[in-house]
Structure formats: structure tokens, C-alpha cells
Image (tube, rainbow, N blue to C red):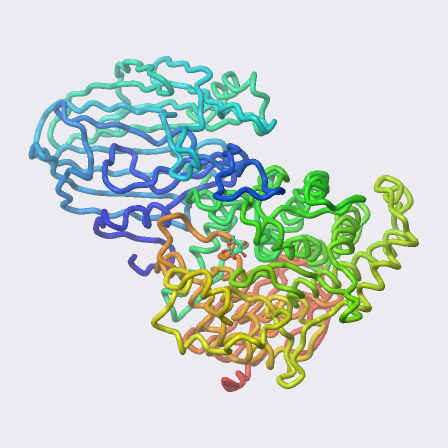
Amino acid sequence: MVPDEWSIIEDSFHPEYNEITESLMSLGNGRMGQRGNFEETYTGKSLLGNYVAGVYFPDKTRVGWWKNGYPAYFAKVINACNWIGIQVEVEGQLLDLYTCRIEAFRRVLDMKRGVLERECTVEMPTGNRLTIRSQRFCNMVDDESGAIRYTIQPLNFNGQITITPYLDGNIRNRDANYDETFWNEIQKETSFAQGILVLETKPNPYGVEQFQVATGMRFDITVNGKRLDFHSHPIRNEKYVAGKVPLKLNERDELTVYKYATNLSSSNHSAGELIPLTKAYLERITKKGYDVLYHEHTQAWAEKWERNDIEIKGDLEAQQGIRFNIFHLQQTYTGEDETLNIGPKGFTGEKYGGVTYWDTEAYCIPFYLSASGQQVARNLLIYRYRQLGKAIENAEKLGFSGGAALYPMVTMNGEECHNEWEITFEEIHRNGAIAYAIYDYIRYTGDEAYLSEYGLEVLIAISRFWRQRINWSEHKKKYVMLGVTGPNEYENNVNNNWYTNYIAAWTLRYTLYAIEYVQKNGDATSIFSKINFDSESEPSAWQKIIDGLHFPYDEVRDVFLQQDGFLDKELLTVDQISEHRPINQKWSWDRILRSCFIKQADVLQGLYFFEDDFDLGTLQRNFDFYEPMTVHESSLSPCVHSILASRLGMKAKAYEMYLRTARLDLDDYNNDTEDGLHITSMAGTWMSVVKGFAGQRVQDGVLVLDPYLPASWESYSFRIGFRGVTLTISVDRDSIRLVNPSDQSVALKIKGTQEDFVGEKVLNLIDQEIVR
Ligand code: BGC
């Protein structure tokens, strides 16, 4: 990809990388998403991807050895009706780029405007030469629609070109447990230059809602800029509607198709209304016309960038990388709908099923809090509140009781979808991240009222789970938590994972605080009676666990141990096994499990979350012990190490880790970009800059900043929203400049000095030497 500040550019066609490019050039608007597929037929390597937010199919679980407690299905966001398709025939021959000689090719994702563009000149096997220019977007304003401008120009012939814009529901998921299709046709309609196709997800035996999606299209045609009176012959096939338009063109004529499309689903509209609503939607957007839609859409992106951009000078690749991350986060989740969430791949591929993981709470919330605002982050918390009942049911299925909640590892509607015992049953630290996000949100926004409204019920339910999951060890005379998997999934079924124990004890402590807060400031009595809470016995049992929980520790090195017995391993460092990496592809699972190598931040994840509980010496010792053993084979890992390294003044290390996260997908670092992008870890990249290089945190309602400039950059600047104010922070070699343009002051602590800040301020930056 060509380095560029605002765009991702493929300047010659590489069919061998096409699926990677399609992932990178995905578009979305929070409601629908679309991989960077071609509009016309393409028979080469391609992963077609059209996704509608909130629409999924419960695919029957497939495992080799069934274990009681496994979920019956895996909910996956499914490939939906293809709305971008425009079939082109030239003198009776199908235009297929795969069979053409490509003379020139350029595909550009314009991140500033949220638009995908392509220009190519091709020679068909018949010798006919053509130029194709296309531009499309998933509309950020009318967010259930997209629009395409598709131009074709014959270069060396006069002849017949037939254009067939279509909607095609004969779609498969590459990821289907039983290789079946997921859609049935319900209804279709065609009229002049318009088509509507209503598809429904197939019935399922799990009582999971079936979704209907109405995809609509309307098109218009111009030749040499003039609107054409054309005849469109409707085509109606099984799960397919189209309008076929044969035209006679002269050499150099420019034929342009404007295709407007909508995706309305029963997840946010009533199923019976979908056809009339689609007609009205199509009417509305086509009336606006392409140019107005384009203008409104690009305006919406300009406003997003105004608030969210991070500008880096002196390092073009870093600039491109960070904008790429922010762009995809903004188009994956806009926060307007509390039933939606952020899948690890967003709308860019099928892997992970498009469902919700702990990634949202641990990684994404800080980004959306600061970049999109309080309400957006709040909706992400309410998503989990709405699923509390299911989390309690989920815990009951595993044998817990009394209102204990275990949130799923992977979910769409609140029900667990993960089906590997060591993760489904054991990777329970996810529960802690959901509690932590409540704390993180309140710490950032000051919205303590959230506790009475929603937060406390969730906290109590999670604390009830920890109480039952932890047991007293007569042998150790301590409370212990057995048989868990920490964030480091390269260890399973371990006892006393330090991180999980720490977040469990922390949840119990925070819940006790929340109870006290709501007792003083809210209606604790009605919450207690709603959930049958015993305000005497439950808190006292929790307190005993807080006081008596076991935390593995090595007195010699003075570090926390990832789990009991960790020191029995052969303690090697990653540089001793460089030829074996990535170990998840080169080693047997057995070897991985017995090794000391760590997939992703584990103890260090805890030190990052709970940094105020530990001094710098403790952080340094643990970082020095664990970082050399960490292989970072989860994309969620390097950002945590980068932030901690920044805190420790290890600037070179912080930058090395930052680079691994910032261009992970652009440079296909993990060799898996073709499956889709690592959307949730993109929030980690943002955190590496804002929380890492700029040292942003919130302590007692005060916004703390402690910025430094990475050695290879000339400057960087970014905006953050904090308690109703948008601050601009700019850092260059000599100074830090802060601007609060509002008349509302912000409690700010910068480089150790606290004040109520409003207006503008410049500080000299005496950049400390690289400490290590
Ligand atoms: C990581 C998990 C993460 C999941 C989805 C896995 O590889 O180990 O921590 O939740 O990917 O991003």
C-alpha cells in the first residue's frame, strides 16, 4: 500500500492480495458494512462481505467432543444480500476483471471522506478496451443506505453495453458450520429501475429471533453527463432482482450508473413495514440525489475528524496507520443504538462471527468515551445491562445460583456462543472487565448516577458469581480460584491466575463501594428487593474473600506470578525462539501450554487497569519479567505493553510496541488481514498514543496528561472530549500546547501541576532522555 496521509492506496492490481485489500478497504456506517469488493463480476479470489448490524444467524455448534454446558449455537453476523452488484456485458461478453488484461488500476480508500474509489483501464479477452471509474460510500447520515457512482467508458469501440444493477441474496458465508445458506426469500418487487428483495434468516430450533432484511435499490443512468431515458427490463429470479439496460455507446462515451441502495432490518423496524419503509427510504434518498448524499456524508465525516483526528508530523506511515485505525473504529460503531456492539472484525470479515467480546469493555470503551462522548460509551454499558438476565441464566446453566451472573465470552444476544471448554467455562476474567468498564466510565464522566440506574445490579450479580467461583483452601488457608484461563490463552486450566484473582477481588471491593454510594444517594432498597439482595450476609462474605484471596507471588524476584506453579516452567525469552514464531502456527498446542510464552498481556493487563494500586518499581519489575516472554500473538497485547512502557519512560520499547499495533492490518503483520481487520485492537492503538505517549488518565475527577514525543516524530496533536469540553493537545520537540476553547474550565494536571484550565497554554517540553 502506498503511504499517504489520508488514503489507503493500491496503485496496481494485485489479485493475489485481493482479499487483504478488500478487508482494508471496507466501508461501514455503524448500521451496515461492506468489504471492498468490486461492483462488476469478479471470478478471482474474493471474499464477498455485506453485513447488516444486529442481524445474525444461530449456527448449530460443531465440536468434536461435546461437553455439558456448551452453547447450542454460535451467533454469527452473516453475509447479507449483495447490494453493490452491477453486471456489465460488452458486446454480449461478461466483464470480469479477473479475465481482463489490466492496463492501469488504482483503488483508493479515502478516509477523510469515507469513500471508496477505483479507476481502471482494462482490455477484455475480445480486445475491447474500457475504463471503469467507481465511487461508493455507506452513508453516515442516512445510515441504512449506500450509494454508488459507476462509470464505464469504451476506449476503442462503438457497441452495445448492457448494464444490469442487481440485488443478490444467493449468498453464502465462508464460515458456516454445516455449509448451508442462511437466508430464505420472503418477498420481492421490481418496477422501473427499482427492486426490493426481502430475505429472512432461516428458522432455527433455539428460539432465536429470525431477522428479515429488506434490501432495496433504485438506479439512474447518464451518458456524457446527461440523464438518459432508458428501458429497464426487470429480472426476477430466486433471491435475485435486477434491471437490465442495453445501451449503444460510441467510443469515449461515458456511461454512468447511479445506484442507491438501502438495507432495512427487522432488528430496528417492524417486519410487516419493511417494504413500504424501503420504498419511502429509496424515494427520499434518490430525491436528494448522489451529489447531495455525497456532500452530507462527507460533511459528517469532516465533523468526526474534527473531533477525532490524531495528526502526526514527521512519520507518514504512523500518520496513515493511526488514521486508518480511527476511521475503522468510527465506521464500525456510532453508538446510536444500545442493542449494537463492536465485533472484533467489525464489518470487515466473518471471523469471530461479528459478536461481542471483552474487547469492548477492556479496549474500546476508552476510545469511544473520549472520541465519541459519554452517551455513546454509556450505550455500550447498557448493552450489557440489557443482557444481565441472560448472564444470570448462563451462570445457572453452569450450576451457579442466587442471581450470580457470568457474562458470555462471545455473544450477540446475551447467550454464550463460545464452545471451547477452556475459554467458555474458564476464561471468566471477562466478567471482571464488564465491572471495570462501569468504573472506567464513571471515573471518566463523573456520572455516578449510572450506579443507581444500571451499574449496581450488574456489579452485584458479577460479585455473586465471584463469591461462588472462589473457594476456601484448607491447605493454603486462603481463598483460591481454580481451573481458569487468564487473558493469556496459552495457559489453560490454571489455578489462581493473578489477573483473574485481582480483578475478582477488585470487583468485590468496588461493588461494596457502589452499594454504599447507592445507599447514600439512590434507592438502594428497591434495587435490593428487586434482586433479593441480603445486605448483611453477602457483603460480609465478599469482604472475607477480599481479605483472604491468594495471589501467587515470587519473593526472590519480587514479582506477581501469572498463576500457581509458573516458576516451574523453563523460563526462556522470546528472542531465544525467534525462528519458531508465531508459536501458534509452528508449535503443537501441547508445547505451547507447557512453555512460559505468553500470548498477550496478563499480569501486565492487571497492572495497566489498576495502575494506581502499584508503585513504579513494582510495575518495572513485572514488566521486565513478563515482557521478554510475551509473544504478542493477540492483537490486543502490544498496546498494553506500549502504554506501560511509556509510563516507565521506556520510550524505545513503547514505540516498538506501538508500531506493532498501528499498522498491524495495513502491513498484514499477523498474516490474517484477509479474514478481516482487527477492529477492537485498533482502539488499543489509539490508547497507545493518548494514554501512552500523552500519558492521559483520570484521577479523582482530574484529567491528567504527561506527554512526550516519540523520537521519530516531529509532532503530534489530538483532541479529547472530557466532561463537556473538547481539548486540543499538541506536542512537538519543544513544547506542549493545550487549548480549551470553551468557557467551561477543566480540572487538569499536566506534568504534575494541577489547575482549572480554560483558554490556551504552552509549556516547554524538556524532553527527558530516553531512560532505557
Ligand atoms: C484474544 C482474546 C480476544 C479475542 C477476540 C483472542 O485471540 O486472545 O483476548 O477477546 O481474540 O479479539
Q: Which residue is drawn at 48% across and 52% down?
A: 679
Q: Residue 514: give x, y in percent of width and height.
A: 82, 55
| Image side of residue 506 versus residue 336, left or right | right
| Image side of residue 207 versus residue 105, left or right | right
Q: Compared to 275, does 356 lie above or below?
A: below
Q: Residue at x 46, y 35 (%)?
A: 78
Q: Compared to 490, does 462 lie above or below?
A: above
Q: Nearer the viewer, residue 260 or 428?
A: 428
Q: Which residue is drawn at 46% across and 56% down?
A: 325
Q: Nearer the viewer, residue 569 or 348?
A: 569
Q: Nearer the viewer, residue 668 or 95?
A: 668
Rendering quarter of residue 347 = top left
Rendering quarter of residue 47 = top left
Q: Which residue is drawn at 26% across and 33% down?
A: 40
Q: Compared to 415, does 278 lie above or below?
A: above
Quarter of the image with the N terminus in it: bottom left
Q: Visible in this render: residue 636?
A: yes
| Image side of residue 250 versus residue 184, left or right | left
